[in-house]
Amino acid sequence: MTQSPYQDPSALGEGPQDTPGFQGLPQAPPVPAAYGYGAQQPMAAPQGMYYDPNAELLLPEGVQLASVGQRIGAYFLSLLLAVVTLGIGYVIWGLIAWSKGRGPAQQLLGMRCWKPADGRVAGWGTMALRNIVGGIAQGILSALSAIASFILFLSGKKHQSIPDLVGSTVVVYDPNKVLDNWQR
């Protein structure tokens, strides 16, 4: 019996590329490792933006992803501000600050919420979604979801907690107030 060039290679125990003198279908040339799906290509940043390879984000020049320490500091500062302003002052301050893409503690610490998909500062609606819906999602199972949110925040490249994921935002540090007049 003659062997067909179209025989199943798995029946032979090896692939056609491993068989010396294989006379079957033509083989495609090898593809260099830098091509194809998942290959890292250098990213050209638009003017006024830069690519942060650690977070895999495009950010405006002069702005950086907020560090874990800055985010934790903002959390504890917001608790202190809520107590000092008796809660109601904090809520009013927050509702006003949301229009600029930040909460009260973020405003004092020079941080903002950035929407990487849109290339802009988060607006009032995004901040309401992030803080109300995201806050409810984070606190719905109490300690369990809060711990999960903290683990996500610590382990992710972009340091996103559950509210950040709900609002599709990242928190950035803007010490030079570059984002005050940001237009794209």
Image (cartoon, rainbow, N blue to C red):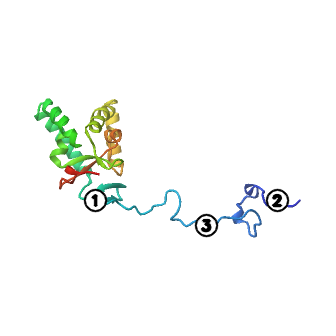
Q: Is residue 142 above or below residue 101?
A: above
Q: How many other residues sit within 10 Å of disc 1, few (<14), some (14-19) or many (≥20)?
A: few
Q: Secondary structure at mark 2?
A: loop
Tag nearer the camera, 1 or 2: 1
Q: How many other residues sit within 10 Å of disc 2, few (<14), some (14-19) or many (≥20)?
A: few
- Label number found at residue 143: none
Say which of 78 and 60 sits in front: 60
* Residue 86 image-quadrant placement: top left
Q: Position of residue 124 (x, y in %)?
A: 25, 38
The residue at the far bottom in this view is 21
Q: Which residue is mark 1?
A: 48
Q: Position of residue 56 (x, y in %)?
A: 37, 55
Task: Give amino acid for label 3.
Answer: Pro
Q: Position of residue 97 (x, y in %)?
A: 18, 39
- Taking 120 as reference, is 26 left or right? right
Q: Tell me what residue is drawn at x 20 percent, y 51 percent.
A: 181
Where, quadrant-wise, is the N terminus in this rendering?
Answer: bottom right
Say which of 76 and 50 sits in front: 50
- Taking 46 as reference, is 34 left or right? right
Task: Give amino acid for label 2.
Answer: Ser
Q: Which residue is mark 2?
A: 4
Q: Tell me what residue is drawn at x 34 percent, y 43 percent.
A: 168
Say which of 55 and 99 sits in front: 99
Q: Secondary structure at mark 1?
A: loop
Q: Earlier in the sequence, mark 3 or mark 1?
A: 3
Q: How many other residues sit within 10 Å of disc 3, few (<14), some (14-19) or many (≥20)?
A: few
Total labels: the figure holds: 3
The residue at the far left in this view is 84
Tag nearer the camera, 3 or 1: 1
Q: Position of residue 94 (x, y in %)?
A: 18, 36
